[in-house]
């Protein structure tokens, strides 16, 4: 079968039409007809080869929603016609101790969809069905995609950071990930403060569920800490004043980092140890947590705010993500 996709043929390139062949799905694989696909900042990191792992041509797209149209002989949890989503992870060994503990995202053989295979900026996708997740009926197709990467990443980063309810939670960066983090944390009963470089996002923060917003100039430092967080989640794809933000951590508080700056980070040891503060770096989430997150999103009506674009406008949408113009997640949809 021939698949029509959009690909970056080299580092930083604009996407162009790209066709590739795929066989009928065998074993655990299934074929999905793509209906919608969110755009994550990681798509840009991979198009630009920021992480030195890109494998051109890159077909971006790892917040994919579609319909199962064919399944391999070993697929038992999905049927033709099911609505499913694929996120960042394409496969894992399924046998190591991390996989067996439900942490497939931590598997040393974890393969990212848009690096080891082709992503969702395409009409069909042939993938390992064990990483295709049924979408609950209460979540609409055009808003479901961003849950598969942005949603799971912030849910997992907050949960492993120790978020329960009744806590003070801070979120740095109100983009695709950040705005969903505000929604998850607030709907689950926490008081949320956001740190943003965008005035309009500060003004909108209460509508996302935050109690307060602090505007911090790009490249600048937050004001001296006047509140203390159990979890402070950074979703920023750039270096920030880590030491300044660490002062906002409560005793035993966790700085949970999910955004990926292209430099190492440095933190003042004394400030961390005198309050037994922790740092956590977290990547997406395992399959069990993905199911939990989707179920929480449906029950608490947590959905992203999206700007939709037809697939043909993918380059325009990517440019808006690059320039921090999207409010709050771009999603490509089939008309
Ligand atoms: N760990 C994981 O598993 C995982 C999964 C998915 C994505 N990611 C990473 O998470 C990061 C965010 O992804 P996203 O899709 O949410 O991106 P996004 O939609 O572009 O949002 C990032 C936000 O960070 C803020 N920001 C951007 N540049 C900044 C700078 N120089 N200084 C301060 N703030 C800045 C902006 O928020 P304001 O306008 O509010 O300031 C921006 O909206 C990316 O690095 C991505 O690769 C990680
Ligand atoms: Zn992503
Ligand atoms: Zn494994």
Image (tube, helix red, strand yellow):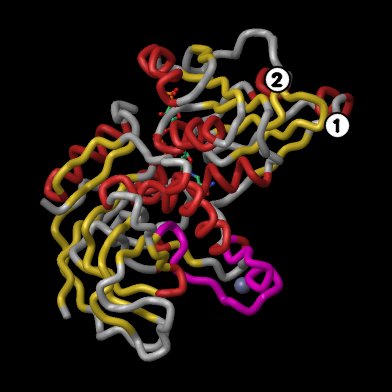
Whether 194 is among the magenta residues is: no
Q: Is residue 1 above or below residue 112?
A: below
Q: Secondary structure under badge 1?
A: loop
Asked if residue 255 lies left or right of residue 34, the reply is right
At which x and y percent is residue 117? Answer: 36, 68
Q: Residues within 10 Å of mark 1 (few under 14, many from 20)?
A: some
Residue range (magenta): 87-105
Q: Position of residue 280 (x, y in %)?
A: 69, 42
Give whichever of 120, 301 is nearer the camera: 301
> Which element carries disc 2, helix, strand or loop?
loop
Of labels 1 and 2, earlier in sequence is: 2
Give me the residue at 47% from left, 17% from top: 218
Residue 92: within the magenta?
Answer: yes
Q: Which mark is residue 276?
A: 1
Viewer-nearest residue: 299 or 318: 299
- State the residue position of label 2: 248
């Amino acid at each position: 079968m021939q698949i029509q996709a959009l690909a970056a043929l080299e580092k930083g390139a604009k996407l162009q039409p790209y066709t590739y062949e795929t066989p009928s799905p065998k074993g655990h694989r299934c074929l999905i007809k793509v209906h919608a696909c969110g755009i994550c900042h990681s798509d840009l990191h991979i198009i630009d080869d920021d992480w030195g792992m890109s494998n051109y041509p890159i077909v971006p797209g790892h917040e994919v929603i579609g319909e199962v149209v064919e399944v391999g002989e070993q697929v038992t949890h999905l049927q033709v016609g099911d609505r499913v989503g694929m996120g960042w992870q394409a496969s894992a060994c399924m046998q190591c101790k991390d996989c067996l503990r439900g942490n497939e995202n931590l598997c040393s053989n974890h393969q990212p969809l848009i690096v080891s295979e082709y992503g969702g900026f395409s009409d069909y996708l042939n993938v390992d069905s064990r990483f295709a997740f049924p979408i609950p009926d209460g979540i609409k197709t055009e808003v479901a995609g961003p849950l598969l990467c942005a949603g799971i990443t912030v849910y997992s980063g907050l949960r492993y950071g120790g978020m329960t309810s009744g806590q003070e939670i801070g979120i740095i960066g109100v983009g695709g990930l950040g705005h969903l983090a505000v929604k998850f944390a607030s709907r689950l009963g926490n008081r949320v403060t956001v740190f943003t470089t965008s005035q309009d996002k500060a003004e909108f923060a209460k509508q996302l569920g935050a109690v307060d917003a602090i505007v911090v100039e790009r490249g600048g430092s937050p004001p001296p800490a006047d509140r203390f967080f159990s979890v402070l989640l950074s979703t920023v794809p750039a270096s920030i004043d880590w030491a300044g933000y660490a002062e906002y951590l409560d005793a035993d508080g966790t700085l949970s980092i999910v955004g990926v700056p292209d430099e190492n980070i440095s933190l003042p040891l004394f400030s961390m140890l005198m309050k037994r503060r922790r740092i956590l770096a977290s990547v997406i989430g395992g399959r069990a947590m993905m199911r939990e997150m989707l179920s929480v999103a449906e029950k608490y009506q947590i959905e992203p705010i999206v700007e939709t674009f037809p697939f043909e406008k993918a380059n325009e949408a990517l440019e808006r993500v690059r320039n921090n113009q999207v409010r709050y997640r771009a999603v490509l949809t089939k008309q």
